Image (tube, grey):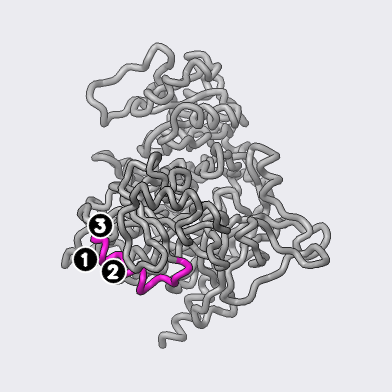
């Protein structure tokens, strides 16, 4: 019966996927109109629970309408970009919806940004207004003089969690919507699928953040895919939403999926590993959205006998690595993991729609894994100038063909958009989106003949040492298996007198104790000799982006340099099987190229 059930499940997924065919761009449908439709269908159903406040769909739609009427009265019009700087809270969702009802575009600003990056994001999309939460006044005040906006162009939104009633500063005005009509705006019917809904910014790991253009069509199709295919949500489902709303997963999975299904969300400002299970039980959340290292953080909580006794049965996200996949499912009683792969700005992606283990799933668009030279950071083309597909099981650069069914909306910056497009890939004139990621095909058993993939590494995160390619993710997974390691971050560093890059790993130890002999033994036994990190850096905490991806830039820059690195450093000397403290004498040998590597 198991095989028959699997086939029926897969056919059901395919049937749902066929319903995701693109609608005409001039279709009058938008995030704002979908919220209004949901409120009309289920006005008394709970929509969101947040810090002791519960709103129904009807109440939320009324709040968003009031905000829309107010913003329209203040000059916000269709096509305007409005920067939104606010933590996860109901007002954030209401502001995005209000702007969508007008036809304006919310620029979803990363709440951890300050100074130059913050200014860049606001200006790069030509924001004509700013909506700022009371909780984030400080970073905005520091760049206020450089914004070029009048005080009546900056709207302040009170945060009920802060002590005192709160008053807008003199350089902003309160977003006073309480007395506004709660009726739907007639102009919402004029907003179409091809119009922009909001901007999502890249994490900025390769420079300043870039604004990705998210149309109402993209929001509609992505959200519907998560809701119906990966989560199979209904009105009875509630999602535990702790992902940042400035991230595409927060908008597509957490917000978008409940709009389509009529379900609800338990909204949290930030992720908390220690509180998640308690809150999931308290608020009866059946779904959980994750990104980056969240699942690993949960596993590092002290195990409890009732960990699996919780209402969460379905998870969706990206970043659940194969080394912890089965442990995560078993310990927390998870029945379905909807892992996916894709970029906010990408034209297609992979989805684990068949609930297979340890895979990002299959790609429904035309795509290819092609050979890539990680040492020289470039595509490998044949004598005719075309790309070459890799063999099954071999890591290759993921490319996705740009077509009318897989449109690449790109960035606000045309130059940045062009850099992500590869031409003449397999024939003259074809165009592919360059994901910048290495993936490989894996065997997942029967899957209707659809190839399934695993994420290997980000291009640039894979390095070459002793003539071999080393995946930082794969080595990191092995080192994370050591008993005293809480988290680790593997990266390549340059050594004088050698080719390529040598491995280095930053380790955050459990309970602050590194247990160097045991870690040495673990690495020597488990990691191939060419891939063993030569250096260990002991860190108290791991620096991550706002989307829980580990940062490598500063770690690479400081490398093993004693005068730049503030943390304890250890080295694996040539011929040794145990790491030892890096002293000044051996450090000088490394710099001189005489250390024996």
Q: Secondary structure at mark 1?
A: loop
Work out which residue is located at the far top of the displayed protein and give it.
170
The range drawn in magenta is 515-531
Label ID, residue 469 = none
Tag 3 and tag 1, C-beta contact below 8 Å: no
- Residue 294 placement, left or right of 196: left
Tell me where residue 333 sits by quadrant.
Answer: bottom left
Is residue 532 a member of the stretch shown in magenta? Answer: no
Q: Secondary structure at mark 3?
A: loop
Q: Residue sitting at 50 percent across and 82 percent down?
A: 445
Magenta highlight: main SS: helix
Label 1, on which residue? Answer: 309
Is residue 520 a member of the stretch shown in magenta? Answer: yes
Looking at the picture, does residue 399 appear above or below residue 95? below
Query: How many residues crowd mark 2 within 10 Å: few (<14), some (14–19), many (20+)?
Result: some
Label 2, on which residue? Answer: 333
Tag 2 and tag 3, C-beta contact below 8 Å: no
Q: Residue sitting at 62 percent across and 31 percent down?
A: 79
Q: Residue sitting at 58 percent across and 39 percent down?
A: 211
| Residue 238 visible in rendering | no
Circle 2 or circle 3, nearest the eye: 3
Instruction: Identify the mark nearer the N-term, 2 or 3.
Output: 2
Instruction: Identify the mark nearer the N-term, 1 or 2.
Output: 1
């Amino acid at each position: 019966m198991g095989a028959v059930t699997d086939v029926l499940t897969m056919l059901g997924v395919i049937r749902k996927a066929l319903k995701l065919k693109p609608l005409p761009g001039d279709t009058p449908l938008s995030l704002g109109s979908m919220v209004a439709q949901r409120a009309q269908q289920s006005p008394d159903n709970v929509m969101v629970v947040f810090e002791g406040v519960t709103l129904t769909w009807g109440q939320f739609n009324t709040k968003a309408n009031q905000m829309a009427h107010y913003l329209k009265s203040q000059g916000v019009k269709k096509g305007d970009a409005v920067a939104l700087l606010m933590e996860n809270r109901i007002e954030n969702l209401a502001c995005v919806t209000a702007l969508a009802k007008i036809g304006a575009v919310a620029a979803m600003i990363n709440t951890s940004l300050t100074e130059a990056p913050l200014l860049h994001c606001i200006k790069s999309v030509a924001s004509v207004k700013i909506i700022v939460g009371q909780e984030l006044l400080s970073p905005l005040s520091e760049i206020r003089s450089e914004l070029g906006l009048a005080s009546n162009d900056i709207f302040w939104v009170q945060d009920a969690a802060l002590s005192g009633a709160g008053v807008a500063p003199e350089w902003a005005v309160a977003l006073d919507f309480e007395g506004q009509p709660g009726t739907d705006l007639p102009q919402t019917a004029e907003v179409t699928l091809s119009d922009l809904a909001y901007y999502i910014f890249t994490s900025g790991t390769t420079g300043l953040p870039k604004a990705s253009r998210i149309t109402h069509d993209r929001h509609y199709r992505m959200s519907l895919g998560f809701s119906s295919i990966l989560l199979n949500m209904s009105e009875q489902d509630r999602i535990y939403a702790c992902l940042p709303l400035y991230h595409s997963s927060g908008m597509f999975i957490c917000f978008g999926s409940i709009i389509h299904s009529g379900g609800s969300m338990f909204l949290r400002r930030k992720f908390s590993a220690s509180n998640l299970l308690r809150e999931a039980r308290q608020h009866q959340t059946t779904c959980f959205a994750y990104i980056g290292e969240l699942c690993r953080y949960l596993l590092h909580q002290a195990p409890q006998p009732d960990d699996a006794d919780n209402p969460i049965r379905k998870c969706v996200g990206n970043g659940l690595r194969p080394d912890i996949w089965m442990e995560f499912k078993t310990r927390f009683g998870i029945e379905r993991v909807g892992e996916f792969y894709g970029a906010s700005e990408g034209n297609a992606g992979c989805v684990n729609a068949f609930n297979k283990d340890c895979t990002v799933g299959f790609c429904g668009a035309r795509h290819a894994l092609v050979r890539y030279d990680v040492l020289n950071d470039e595509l490998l083309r044949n004598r005719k100038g075309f790309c070459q597909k890799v063999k099954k099981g071999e890591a290759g650069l993921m490319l996705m063909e740009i077509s009318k069914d897989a449109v690449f909306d790109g960035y606000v910056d045309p130059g940045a958009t062009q850099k992500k497009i590869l031409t003449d890939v397999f024939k003259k004139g074809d165009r592919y989106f360059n994901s910048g990621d290495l993936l490989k095909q894996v065997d997942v058993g029967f899957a209707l003949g659809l190839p399934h993939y695993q994420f290997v590494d980000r291009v640039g995160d894979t390095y070459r040492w002793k003539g071999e390619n080393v995946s930082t993710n794969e080595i990191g997974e092995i080192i994370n298996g050591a008993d005293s390691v809480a988290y680790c971050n593997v990266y390549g560093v340059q050594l004088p007198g050698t080719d390529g890059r040598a491995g280095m790993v930053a380790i955050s130890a459990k309970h602050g104790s590194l247990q160097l002999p045991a870690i040495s033994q673990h690495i020597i036994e488990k990691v191939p000799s060419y891939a063993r990190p030569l250096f260990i850096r002991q860190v108290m905490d791991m620096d991550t982006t706002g989307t829980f991806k580990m940062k490598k830039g500063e770690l690479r820059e400081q490398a093993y340099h004693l005068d730049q690195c503030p943390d304890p450093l250890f080295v694996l000397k040539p011929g040794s099987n145990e790491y030892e403290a890096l002293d000044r004498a051996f450090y000088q040998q490394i710099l001189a190229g005489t250390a024996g590597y």
